[in-house]
Image: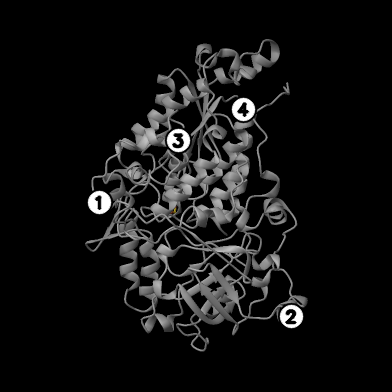
Amino acid sequence: MEQELRSRGWFGKKGKDGFIYRAWMKNQGIPDFEFQGRPVIGICNTWSELTPCNAHFRELAESVKRGILQAGGFPVEFPVMSLGETLIKPTAMLYRNLVSMDVEESIRANPVDGVVLLCGCDKTTPALVMGACSVNIPSIVVSGGPMLTGHYKGKQIGTSDVWRFNDAVRTGEMTEEQLAEAEASMCRSRGHCAVMGTASSMACMVEALGLTLPGNAAIPAADSRRKVLAQYSGLRIVEMVKENLRPSDVLTRAAFENAIMVNAAIGGSSNFVIHLLAIAGRIGVDLTLQDFDTHSTHIPLLANIQPSGKYFMEDLYYAGGLPAVMKELLGHLNKDAFTVTGKTVFDNVSDAECYNREIVASTDQPINPVSGIIVLNGNLCESGAVVKPSAASSHLMKHSGKAVVFEDIEDYKARIDAPDLEVDESSILVLKNVGPMGYPGMPEVGNMALPRKLLAKGVTDMVRISDGRMSGTGFGTVILHASPEAAAGGNFAVVQSGDTISLDVLNRSLVLHVTDEELANRKLSWKSKAADPGRGYVSLYVRHVEQSHLGADLDFLKGMSGSTVTRDSH
Ligand code: FES
C-alpha cells in the first residue's frame, strides 16, 4: 500500500528533494513517522470570520483530525478562499468557479492522498466538490450544519422570513425597531441558514450523491453529534484512501439522478440545478437541464421544511434526517448507487426511521404532491428556464400578462415603488441582465419584491421572470435562469414593457407573443450589457462563463486533470 500513496512522491524521496519536503514539515514539530508511509489527508477548510456560516470550522476540523489520527492517517489542514453569502459583493456566485480552481490546484499541488471537504455556506459546497472532482482523489464531504431555529416574539423564524419582514416594513406593518429585534433573534447559533435554502439543499445534495456519511445534512451545527460525524468522516477517509475510492466511483449518472429526486422530496433550492450541472461537467457525467424535470416532477414533497413547508432543518434532524426522507424514496431511487461508506444507498438508508410524520411525510400522504423543478421552454428562453412549483402560487401556474420590464437591477430598484409605474397584479415583472455574464455573477435577485402599491392592496405573489437566480430561501411564482441570458442576446434581451407573455407551467411553456420579424428588428439595435473590466478574475470570468443551462462553470474548467504531478522544482 505504501508505494501507492501519492504523498510518497514528496515525503518518500531521497536526497535534496526529500530533505526539503520533509525538513520544513518538521518545523511544525512533526516526527518522521507521522507522515512517512501514512495516508496524508488534506482538510480543505473554508473557515472564515467573513463567512459567518462557516466560522466554527476550525473546531470541526479538530474533530476530523482526531478521526484521521485514530485511523492511522496524517491530517494537514489547509485554507481555501471562502464565500460568505451575506457579505460578498457583488455576489458570491461570481467566485464559485474561482474557489473551485483554488481547491483543485491546492489539492493537486500538495502531498495529499485524500481530502475532507469542509463545506457550509451556499457556494462553498459546490465549489469544493467541483474542485475535488477535477483532481479525483478520495474525497469526503463534511457539512457545517444548519443553525438552530430562530425565535422572535414566540414565533419560530428563519431566513425565509427576511423576505416577509422586508415586505412588512415596506407596507408599514412592521417598524424598523421590530425589524432590528427580529434581526437579533434569527441567527442565534453557529451554522448556516436554518431553512431548506441553498446551503441546506447543498448539504442534502452531497448526502444524496453519496459523498458524505449518512445523516450529514441535517445535524445542527451546535449539536455535539455534528462533531461526532466529523470524527467518523476522518476515520472513513483513511479507509477510502486504502480502497482508492474516488469521486468518479461515486458520482455516476445514477447518483446524479438520486440527487435530483431527493432535491424534489425536500423542496430544495433552484440553485441546486446550476451547481449539480457544474459538478456533473467536472466529473464527466452528461447531465442536461431536461434531466431535472424528467427525474423530479414525479416526486412528491416529503420534507415539511421552509420555504416549501413549515418547519426547520433542526426539526428535520429530530424527525430522522435525510436518511428518513431517502428511505421513503427507495421505490424511486437508484438503490445500488455506491457511496463513500463503501456501501450502496440502500444499505445506508434502509434501516432509517422516521420519528415525526408531520415533518417527513410518507409517499402515500405527501406534504404536497407537486414538487421538483419544472423546466420551461419557449421563445422567451430558447435554452430553457426553471420554476420551483412547490414555492409558487397555484393560481399563477397558468397566466398571461403584460410585461413590466426592468433593464437591470438598478433600474428595478429605481422604479419598482414609483407611484406612476404601470403595473397591476396581472402584470409580469421581467428583470434582465442579472445572468452569469450580464451582472456579472448571476445574483439572487429573481424573486423581486412586489411593487409597494400592490403589496398595500394585499397582493402577495406575481409572475416574475429573470435570467438571474433566487435565494433558496425565497418563494413565489418566480421563473429563473432564463437562458440565453439578456447579455448573450437571445429573445430575452429584447422583451419590452407592454409585450404579452404567457406562462403555462404544466405544459412547460413560456411564450413571448411578439413576431419573429419584430424580434429580429429589435435585435438590430441591441447591445450586450456584459462589461469586461479588461483585467483580473472578473475579466476571465466574463469571457469564459457558460450559460446557466450548462451550469455557469468556466468553459476551460470542465472535466478533470487528475492528480499527477511529475516535476520537482528544487
Ligand atoms: Fe450562509 Fe444562508 S447565508 S447559508
Earlier in the chain: of badge 4 and badge 2, it is 4
Please, what secondary structure does the residue beneath circle 4 have?
loop
Cα distance in 3D space between marks 2 and 3: 52 Å
The residue that disc 4 covers is: 110
What residue sits 54% from the left and 53% below the top?
291
Cα distance in 3D space between marks 4 and 1: 47 Å
The residue that disc 2 covers is: 517
The residue that disc 1 covers is: 357
The reply to whether discs 4 and 1 touch (Cβ–Cβ < 8 Å) is no
Earlier in the chain: of badge 2 and badge 1, it is 1
Quadrant of the drawing holding the N terminus:
top right
Q: Nearer the viewer, residue 543 or 370?
A: 370
The image shows residue 299 at horizontal and vertical percentages of 41, 54
- The three-letter amino acid code for the residue at tag 1 is Arg
Dot in front, 4 or 1 = 1
Dot in front, 4 or 2 = 2
Earlier in the chain: of badge 3 and badge 4, it is 4
Bin the neighbour count of mark 1 within 10 Å (Cα to Cα): few under 14, some 14-19, many 20 and up: some
The image shows residue 235 at horizontal and vertical percentages of 42, 25
The residue that disc 3 covers is: 336
Determine whether 16 is above or below 489 in the image: above
Earlier in the chain: of badge 3 and badge 1, it is 3
Cα distance in 3D space between marks 3 and 4: 34 Å
